[in-house]
Image (cartoon, rainbow, N blue to C red):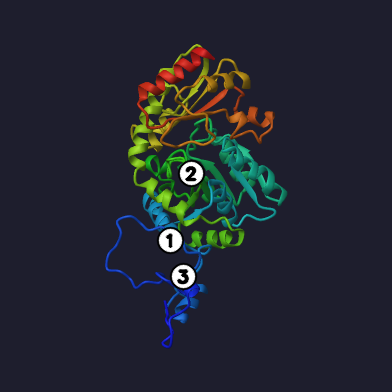
Amino acid sequence: MRMDDQHQAGFATRAVHAGEHLPPADFVPIATPIHVGASYIYQDLERLYGVTTGEQEGYVYTRYGNPTVGAMEAAVAEMEGTATAFGTASGMAAVHTALLGAGLQAGDRVVASRDIYGSAYTLLNGLLRRFGVETTFVDVTDLAAVREAIRVKRPRLVHCEVISNPLLRLADIPVIVEEARHVGAVVTVDSTFATPYLATPATWGVDMVIHSSTKYLGGHGDVVAGVIACDEATRAALWDVAIQTGGILSAFDGWLVLRGIKTLALRMSRQCSNAMAIAESLRGHPKLRRVHYPGLAEHPQHDLAATLLRPGTFGAMLAFELQDDSQAGAMRFLSALRRVLPTQSLGDVYSSALIPALSSHHMLSPEERATIGVSDGLIRFSAGIEDPDDLVRDVLQALDRC
């Protein structure tokens, strides 16, 4: 606080400025501080405006950048093996920012997996289509169809998920990247289900690795956030999009994600083993038509999963289809659960389940859901860190009662 040499400032002035702008301390907190300031000042005005114009590094306004968010971005980049990363206000903000940051414009083409998160499908097939971007959706498990779509459409961008939401289908990303390079396409991959604990798509040549940090990176059901791991040039393009559209991440939410990343390995290890235990307990159950989990030997992509993912781990998500293929039957199952929570998200420390036809994919028409394979009786299950025996008992008793 600056004081006038002639008199002490008035009460209101002192109340506003007291305790602010203290000199730097010679200690460092072990946890990254939450920098909540909307803007920043410098002793040197030339420095302030040098940062503002981008001629110097630093922070001037949180929409342009924030130290806490920057720490989270650095952590994600370290985990993904990329030069940098960019935080966003939500997972869908990350998808949207990535697509626009890739330079999509009217007349451009996209090739995308048809089995992706419902909101991402709707973004491509709705909003971006209205703006003149044409998307061809393909079965990502059919590499011949993927190759043909890329070679015929010659897209600007190819988009898929490492492990798909909600049917747990895997994309052979090294092959897809190779095909995309033949036509000069940018490759964006949503790795939310995999997390950097299971896979690091940038090592396969992916340009942008997208996460809904709301899920496993945050991991505790208390934050909504997104992040994109990429190189420096791509980050500059993402930054340009984000500061104009406003989908930036707050300091507190960035801090929550950073805190969550510290226990990601511990949580994912337990969650993956819990998912395997549940999937194995559901094998051959008379109330089920099918169990979708790449860790099961009968999963059609089990060998690919063993190649792409961390050895011995197959993810913490599974899905299963009830014999009673109706929304009413699915509702009875969810209502019978006692410990597993019927929440609309995933990847948290507690286990949860939902009906994709009524939640993550409710924006799609029944015909679109049928094409993808999302039936009315499909249940998406997110394994938490609880005792596995408790989870297995809860799922089995709910099946008995539905």
Q: Amino acid at mark 2?
A: Thr
Image quadrant assignment for residue 17: bottom left
Find residue 99 and name its label.
Answer: none
Front-most of residues 182 and 23: 23
Up-down relation of residue 127 to residue 291 (above or below): below
Left or right of 293 on screen, residue 105? right
Across and down, in percent, residue 247 comes to: 57, 55
Image quadrant assignment for residue 124: top right
Q: Amino acid at mark 1?
A: His
Q: CA distance from mark 2 to mark 3?
A: 38 Å
> Residue tagged by mark 3?
15
Q: Mark 2 or 3, which is nearer the eye?
A: 3
Residue 313 visible? The answer is no
Q: Which quadrant of the rendered structure holds the C terminus?
A: top right
Q: Amino acid at mark 3?
A: Ala
Up-down relation of residue 351 to residue 88 (above or below): above
> Residue tagged by mark 2?
214
Give SS at disc 1.
Answer: loop
Left or right of 124 on screen, residue 235? left
- How crowded pointer 2 is (Cα within 10 Å; few <14, some 14-19, many 20+) is rated as many
Q: CA distance from mark 3 to mark 1?
A: 21 Å
